[in-house]
Image: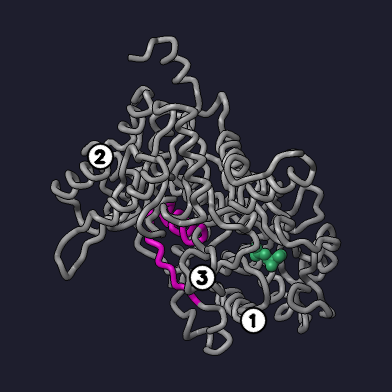
Amino acid sequence: MTCPFFKFIWELMTKHIFITGGVVSSLGKGITAASIAMLLKRRGYRVRMQKLDPYLNVDPGTMSPYQHGEVYVTDDGAETDLDLGHYERFSEIPCSKASNYTTGRIYSSVISREREGGYLGGTVQVIPHITNEIKAAIHSLDSEDTDIVITEIGGTAGDIESLPFLEAIRQFRHELGDENTLFIHLTLVPYIKAAGEMKTKPSQQSVGILREIGIIPDILICRCERPMLEEHRSKLSLFCNVPKELVIEEQDVANTIYEVPIELAKQDLDKHVLNILSLPEKSLEIEDWKTMVDTVINPRNGKVEIAVVGKYISLKDAYKSIYEALIHGGIANSVKVLIRMVEAEDLERFPEKDILAGADGILVPGGFGDRGVAGKIKAIEYARTKNIPFLGICLGMQCAVIEFARNVCGFKEADSTEFNRKTNYPVIDLMEEQKMVTAKGGTMRLGSYPCVIGEGTKSRIAYDKTSIGERHRHRYEFNSSYKYEFEKNGLVIAGTSPDGRLVEIVELKNHPWFVACQFHPEFKSTPLKAHPLFMNFIKAARSLQK
Ligand code: GLN
């Protein structure tokens, strides 16, 4: 029995939950971590979230979407893992630079400290210097205002790269004690068709690997395609050393990932977590979430089909936040959103009408480099001339400006200097502050910047306010020396930086709904609070449906 005074101190401390994964990657650790955060927040706890990634890039900002999926940008300008998008969408808890550390980032700070003489006389080693740096990264989220920090460890138990992270969290428990730390292991319980059976052996083995490192999971979450039977639970409990009620099933959900927290709550996962951490249960309020899930499953107002014209279409994680934000726009309008993924380069080979016909809205997302740009421009021309609702994001906005310059203003060779440095009409040009930048990592215009919206615009209607803050990730911008020509021809400058220098949103005067923004609205959309631009884009797509 803990004495009341110590119990009080325990309850004041920031407690730590660690989530590891076993057997295979892509089990949905991010969604599970996000669901747990959401449930704990809705039980009245102040939660922060973090992901530790075992690769050597300092952050994912320099990685191709083919390697890594989308790069998620936080308000404070960190280029991070896409799981942070799940964290923010599920829990509405803001992430920051402290929410994503990679092996590269940990090593780079240890190495710079070594060069500055910070370890003078000492031999710098993985243990204790790297593990101490990892522990400091985890503690960086502790504060008086934080009850619980959830840290997801990327990779799979058994990976060589993950070892320093696992050693660090083992030490964490040793230092903070059982009541302040909790290990959750997410594992796969596969169904083997030929044998007609579910197999627990891979989970036993991955728990075995953790045990060798000195980590004994408190809770096992089992990803499975089919319901687990009593015998599987008993086996996993016995061999993995976890009480039976702490063997939690996380079956594939039928309709939407937003069902996951509801399913976990049905098994009292959140209650178990609080009990292990010696925290009072408090009540859980998720009715609004359940109603939202209901809307996804049974929308009242039919469906719309949105064509997303991108260049990483084959990879479903490359535009993760965009796809989610479209679904949120659908929830807000009680409409099912079907997404037609269009490979931009296909538009360079086949007629637009064959590829885009029947789409109720067209979205061109962000990107880098000129591959697929010609196709994106064709899609934009199609949306403009056929009065199809259009949302352009970042590169999508820049392409909309190029299309307008070429086809409406008559500047046939208009281009972005990203694609043609020598163009006579550089309607999109490198930002002034980028001209001296040569290093690639973390050097773009990143994070949240204010924007002022003009009266009488579609954006003003959508946001219902004049001052907004949105997240950016770009080097090029609208070239303001063409403002007059553009406005004269019917382009509306709907949003600018407060000093009026940077153009942040453009619209078309003679079009039912054509909005293109330099920032990334998708990063701020959540299922319960759809982003205003996505909500209004879907609304326009539905009401103008042919
Ligand atoms: N490549 C463009 C730029 O750097 C657009 C970037 C983006 O779409 N995120 O400005």
Instruction: Determine the quadrant in which ligand 1 lies.
Output: bottom right
| Residue type for callout 3 | Val
Left or right: where 282 falls relative to 482? left
Residue hosting label 2: 267
Q: Callout 3: 10 Å neighbours few (<14), some, many (20+)?
A: many
Contact between marks 2 and 1 (CB within 8 A): the answer is no
User: Looking at the image, is 132 positioned above or below residue 532?
Assistant: above
**Sequence-earlier tag: 2 or 1:** 2
Q: Which image quarter is the N terminus in?
A: top left
Q: Residues within 10 Å of mark 2 (few under 14, many from 20)?
A: some
Q: CA distance from mark 2 to mark 1?
A: 51 Å
| Residue on which disc 3 sits | 308
Quadrant of the frame with the C terminus: bottom left
Q: SS class of the residue under badge 3?
A: strand
Specify the amino acid type for callout 2.
Gln
Q: Can you identify the residue that label 1 sits on?
A: 374
Find numbered disc 2 in the image and state the secondary structure of the residue it sits on: loop
Observer-side mark, 3 or 2, equals 2
Q: Is residue 363 left or right of residue 476?
A: left
- The answer to whether one can see residue 299 in this image is no
